[in-house]
Image (cartoon, rainbow, N blue to C red):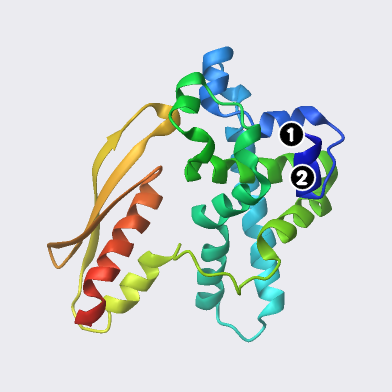
């Protein structure tokens, strides 16, 4: 854990918080039959802390940018791809506590798992050292050099909407096609239609992420038509 703390730039006073942040639901359910022992509640808290820190950073750094621009920049910085990239830099997957099946299935390198773990670690640092500790980790992991990093197109639904609105009377609709897998590792499949015609489909670990993937596929297909 010491190597991870050095990479984070923060030393935990309560190591149990860091350990919980690294405990996936598959491990908690397998070992204790208790989902509350996993990092999911920390992930919930970390998501809000992360969103606030990034929003404040963008608000202060770009005083002349409108709300829509700030929203898109924030989405790029906090998307799954961005968080998974930060996790890879920390080698966070090596420290995760996973259930046997999840471990064998490649969970240590799965973006959805490592991205969620980053949010959990941010929450754990907040509970351990207060807001300055959490802010410091977010700044070091995600905001150094931002927004020079290549965007991860997290807000492609908005980009798709803006594209099709170049013409009048365009109607976009998202439909959930399938939800599969165990509770701790679900996969959602979504398709997006334009005026009743399917223009893209995608999958993800949540309905929101599947919609983004579908929108990205639609963007690629429709880019030359508008």
**Quadrant where the image shows the C terminus:** bottom left
Residue 141: x %, y % from top left: 69, 56
Judged by depth in the image, the label closer to the viewer, 1 or 2, is 1
Residue 38: x %, y % from top left: 60, 27
In the image, 62: left or right of 172?
A: right
The circle drawn on residue 18 is 1
Residue 55: x %, y % from top left: 64, 66
Residue 33 visible in rendering = no
**Quadrant where the image shows the N terminus:** top right
In the image, 182: left or right of 214?
A: right
Is disc 1 in contact with disc 2, using a CB cutoff of under 8 Å?
no
Residue lying at the far right of the rendered structure: 13
Identify which residue, 89 or 43, lies in the foreground: 89
**Residue at image coords 27%, 45%:** 189
Q: Which residue is mark 2?
A: 126
Residue lying at the far left of the rendered structure: 197
Identify which residue, 211 or 89, lies in the foreground: 89
Mark 2 element type: helix
10 Å neighbourhood of mark 2: few (<14), some, or many (≥20)? Answer: many
Residue lying at the far bottom of the rendered structure: 64
Identify which residue, 4 or 196, lies in the foreground: 4
Q: Residue 172's quadrant in the figure?
A: bottom left
As drawn, 163 above or below 190: below
**Residue at image coords 70%, 78%:** 61
Distance from disc 1 to disc 2, alpha carbons, whole Å, reads 11 Å
Residue 208: x %, y % from top left: 39, 51
User: How many numbered marks have been drawn onto this rendered protein structure?
Assistant: 2
**Residue at image coords 22%, 73%:** 222
Residue 47 visible in rendering = yes
As drawn, 14 above or below 156: above
In the image, 40: left or right of 128?
A: left
């Amino acid at each position: 854990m010491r190597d991870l703390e050095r990479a984070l730039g923060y030393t935990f006073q309560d190591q149990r918080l860091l350990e919980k942040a690294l405990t996936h639901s598959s491990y908690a359910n397998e070992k204790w039959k208790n989902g509350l022992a996993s990092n999911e509640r920390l992930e919930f808290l970390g998501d809000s802390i992360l969103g606030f820190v990034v929003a404040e950073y963008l608000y202060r750094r770009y005083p002349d940018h409108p709300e829509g621009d700030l929203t898109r920049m924030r989405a790029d910085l906090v998307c799954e791809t961005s968080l998974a990239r930060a996790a890879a830099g920390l080698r966070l997957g090596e420290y995760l506590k996973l259930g046997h099946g999840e471990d064998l299935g490649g969970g240590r390198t799965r973006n959805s798992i490592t991205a969620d773990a980053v949010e959990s670690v941010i929450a754990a640092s907040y509970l351990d050292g207060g807001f300055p500790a959490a802010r410091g980790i977010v700044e070091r992991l995600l905001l150094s050099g931002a927004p020079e990093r290549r965007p991860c197109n997290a807000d492609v639904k908005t980009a798709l909407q803006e594209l099709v609105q170049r013409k009048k009377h365009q109607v976009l609709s998202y439909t959930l096609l399938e939800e599969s897998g165990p509770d701790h590792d679900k996969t959602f499949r979504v398709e997006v239609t334009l005026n009743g015609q399917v223009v893209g489909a995608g999958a993800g670990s949540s309905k929101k992420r599947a919609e983004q993937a579908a929108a990205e596929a639609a963007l690629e297909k429709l880019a030359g038509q508008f």
